[in-house]
Amino acid sequence: AGEFNPQDIANVLWALAVMGDEFDASFDVLLNRMAARVLELRDQATEVEKCQLHQWILSCELGLASGASLPTGVARVKQEMGEACLQAFSRQATHESQLLRDDVAAALRSTGLEVEIEEEYCDARSGYNIDVLVRRRSAAGGTGGAKS
């Protein structure tokens, strides 16, 4: 981990997050070393790498068993870089994705389905932007469950 650049670190951490429950106690040692390297290189991290780190932190949080705490390395990265990573993730919308979102929303509206469509929905807890949030209309005129 000592020679890895920020992109190397982001790639490895993402792979570890995806395979995290496949590892034993040595996984924690590797994770802590990688997290220490992330913190060493925090000033060099690009917006894309911060986005990947946000997704890694979030995947670790979502994968926790009830009542469990984040591994030490993940908790340190979240504490020291979490807000910057969340902000980078929230800014990531591109022109191309906006065009696609507009096309999808227009297609959904043209179907005549009994749904309400909200574009650019942002989930406050995770920072995830949902391009098009679709809610079923209830019989009383309100909205039911959301689909994306």
Image (cartoon, rainbow, N blue to C red):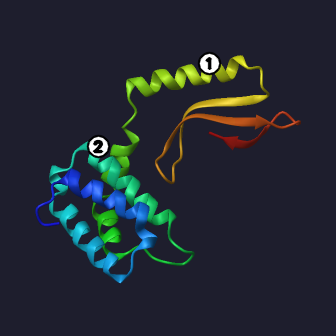
Q: Amino acid at mark 1?
A: Ala
Q: State the residue lying farthest toward the left.
A: 3
Q: Amino acid at mark 2?
A: Val
Q: State the residue lying farthest toward the front.
A: 22
Q: Is residue 89 left or right of residue 35?
A: right
**Badge 1: few (under 14), some or many (20 or more) residues near its Cα, within 10 Å?**
few
Measured as percent of width and height from the top left, residue 46 is found at 22, 45
Q: State the residue lying farthest toward the right.
A: 139
Residue 116 figure quarter = top right
Measured as percent of width and height from the top left, residue 93 is found at 40, 33
Question: Image point 33% across, 55% down: which residue?
Answer: 53
Q: Answer with mark 2 or mark 1, whichever residue precedes in sequence.
A: 2
Which numbered marker is on residue 97?
none
Q: Is residue 25 left or right of residue 99?
A: left
Against 110, residue 27 (above or below) is below
| Quadrant in which the C terminus is drawn | top right
- Element at label 2: helix
Q: Is residue 96 left or right of residue 66?
A: left
Q: Is residue 129 left or right of residue 108?
A: left
Residue 92 figure quarter = top left
Q: Which residue is mark 1?
A: 106
Question: Image point 39% across, 80% down: which residue?
Answer: 24
- Element at label 1: helix
Question: Image point 88% across, 36% down: which residue?
Answer: 140
Measured as percent of width and height from the top left, residue 45 is found at 20, 50
The Cα–Cα distance between marks 2 and 1, rounded to whole angstroms, is 29 Å
Measured as percent of width and height from the top left, residue 68 is found at 50, 78
| Quadrant in which the N terminus is drawn | bottom left
2 and 1 marks in contact (CB < 8 Å): no
Q: Which residue is mark 2?
A: 48
